[in-house]
Amino acid sequence: MADGLIDQVRAAAGQGRRLRIRGGGTKDWYGEQPADADAATVLDTRGHAGIVEYDPSELVVTARCGTPLADLEATLAASGQMLACEPPHFGSGATVGGCVAAGLSGPRRATAGSIRDFVLGAKLINGRGQHLSFGGRVIKNVAGYDVSRLLAGSLGILGVITEVSLKVVPAPVAETTLRFDGIAQAEAIRRLNHWAGQPLPLSASAWSGDTLHLRLSGAAAAVRSATTALGGEVLDAPSAATFWLALREQSAPFFAGDAPLWRLSVPSWTPPLLPGGHSQDAPPDMLVEWGGALRWMRSTLPAETMRAAARDAGGHATLFRRGSLSDAQASGIEAAGCFSPLDPALLRIHQRLKAEFDPAGVFNHGRLYPGL
Amino acid sequence: MDTPAAASIDREALVSRLQALLPDGSVLHTDEAQRPYECDGLTLFRQLPLATVLPSTESELLAVVAVCREAGVPIVPRGAGTGLSGGATPHAQGVLLSTAKMSAILAIDPVARTARVQPGVRNLAISEAAARHGLYYAPDPSSQIACSIGGNVAENSGGVHCLKYGLTVHNVLRVRAVTIDGDVVEFGSGALDGPGLDLLAVLVGSEGMLAITTEVTVKLIPRPQVARCIMASFDDVGVAGDAVAKLIAAGIIPAGLEMMDQPATRMVEPFANAGYDLDAASILLCEADGTPEEVEEEIARMSEVLRAAGATGLRVSTSEAERLRFWAGRKNAFPAAGRVSPDYYCMDGTIPRRRLGEMLRAIQQMEAKYEMRCPNVFHAGDGNLHPLILFDANDPSSLARAEAFGVDILELCVKLGGTVTGEHGVGIEKINQMCVQFPADEREQFFGVKRAFDPHGLLNPGKCIPTLHRCAEYGRMKVHGGELPHPGLERF
């Protein structure tokens, strides 16, 4: 089934050509965009699609890379199950392979785990054109190194993910969204961390513009008692669904604008970040997710300013979307790179791993870091 | 063993170099002093190393790594030595590095809900230290009283609650480790993700072959207010297996879901007084935890499903003491096996849950074939089996039959779509079965991962991933009537 993809990889490796692995192209904008990217041939994964195995009582689904993410989610929903981390699609064509390779998780991440936490196995075409199988279709498996989880978020630099097995979870029986108005960022972060230390059925949070939204999911009794204990205004179900979807897909009003969108990943208890000389009394406009562990900001501040703010807090900053920058601004930010620079020892391990999986540098050259 | 050529190592020179770097008493070199380190929980394999070192700090550990790297001497890291697969079996030409003296809890942060600890800290000690904040560390391997967090990271340890709360890999935020190059590297961070490849994911479960852990930051979670446990009886193991699938299909994720067959309950009961139904062909332990309302709701739903699935009796724990008794039986299964038999061999395969009945029937046939008893306990929720083969190591025929029995079980696990190890690791115990589970190209890619971290192959060499040569030898051993085993075997 994957023969067509394998042939294309072998041909490219043989001819010294580069490949850009692409599913629905919904995340084309994500990651580094090296100047020579256009020289690479697109390897379209969409032809390799379909659910290979799904037995709801096993809590595991196996799907080929080109399977539309929406189809996979619909299949799971029909059996009352779902992907635990609520991954963003960023467009109607999102595929399962792209979802795993991008490694992005949605609102449920802080309490449920990330996409890598749910990867149980994967098949991969490496740079030698070998079709390899790692992990498996069972929940517990420690045979060999956990290469399949390593592929989550690898942005295709190690090879073409052709198939993944994911652990799935039952959809919650009950769900309620609470809204708290007039809460400053520092207070929201304090409350979120306090609540996270208590046995509450939290499943998502979002703060922006002095409003905090909190989602509770789980057993009906647990959601009911937490709703009573926490107070706040209960959103009706359709409004709540719209709200969390807009957050996940970044179609919420906060994400509008032309300035670059920064993603700051920090320890959840970090007080409001103050890049560029803001004071604690007037912190910059941010959207806070994941119980405080993820902060979004639209800003034209220099990359190093954003990176320093995240680094000082023990985290890292990613230029998530470039926005519509002038060329001069863009060149400054482009030079700084999308992702926080790696410590030299870590970079060395990255370089060696790349050389072991893709010795000729066929796949997604420069998408994660220059030279990888 | 498959090791780098450790030409001619001058043991005395090595020992004196190590002694010069470490405080008195931290370098053991006589046979007598090293005897406690000659094996881990896999006692079938014993080997004395050239020397055993017990560094107390990261800088002492770095110094040991530098000496070994320069001399080309392999290092075998060891936590508490409770591992069951020989991951810490010493190397005859190597140094055994114990992290036992690095056992400080550095910080418990109730706001961040994290614990920062040294690798030698015991698993249970973390939860004990976090208890006053209403928090705990979720993964609970049955050896949690003794096993160390560094060892848990190396083995990606599970436990009886991991269906709901995850394995070590899901509960570790950051690992600080020393590479063979002498770099101190932080994998992961206090944030929920990091830049670049997720190397933490591959470091966890790498059996001490990629780097040596010097500090671990784990996630702490709120202790549930209440937990209650159902003991369900079944008159047929297959029916019990189906009941497990029905619970999951009903959208229930129990906090714990364990199964024991009748030989296992009868073996354990005199030892643990758990109150098990000894007439049942098998019992299921299903736990619900959370708020009191939540637990009541879930116990009711689980009871309904279990009854409909054919349970012949249900008992719900009415007190914390009773719940703990139910679990005491399960957690003491291994020691109980050690009491009724001179030796026991614990298997650790995982299979898709729906193949459970098939597997148990096959094990019964193997019991007849090998004329040995094999009680079964398993983490039914995640299909992870622990058949306990009872044998007598002083009887060579008994030992040989036990090993052959184990191989049959593991190879059947692979055939049924599972894996040779769910949570105990490959070590040296299951290294031959890795040849059955992974074709040569995959194994070579694993070696590629190892080279990326450890270019000269000095960290715990010869474990976990078999060489081509070793698999060829194993293949020859297994050829029967000119046919290779499982010629049409699927990869998964």
Image (cartoon, rainbow, N blue to C red):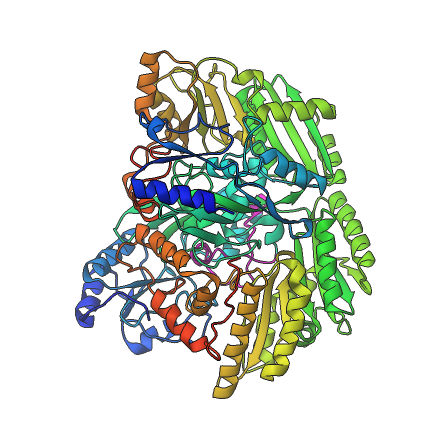
Q: How many marks?
A: 0
Front position in the image: A43 or B373: A43
Residue A359: x and y in percent read 30, 45
Specify the quadrant of the image occupied by residue A304.
Answer: top left
Residue B113: x and y in percent read 52, 41
Residue A213: x and y in percent read 63, 24
Q: Which residues are magenta?
A: B132-160
Can residue B372 be seen here? no
Describe residue A174's horizontal placement relative to residue B419 as left or right. right
State yes or no: residue B145 in magenta: yes
Front position in the image: A200 or B445: B445
Q: Main secondary structure of the magenta part?
A: loop
Residue A227 vs A144, above or below: the answer is above
Q: Quadrant of the N terminus of chain B?
A: bottom left
Describe residue A306's horizontal placement relative to residue A190 as left or right. left
Residue at 60%, 23% in the rendered image: A246
Front position in the image: A250 or B289: A250
Residue A320 vs B225, above or below: the answer is above
Describe residue B461's horizontal placement relative to residue B218 as left or right. left
Residue at 60%, 84% in the rendered image: B371
State yes or no: residue B161 in magenta: no
Residue A81 vs B418, above or below: the answer is above
Specify the quadrant of the image occupied by residue B383.
Answer: bottom right
Residue A93: x and y in percent read 56, 29
Can residue B289 be seen here? yes
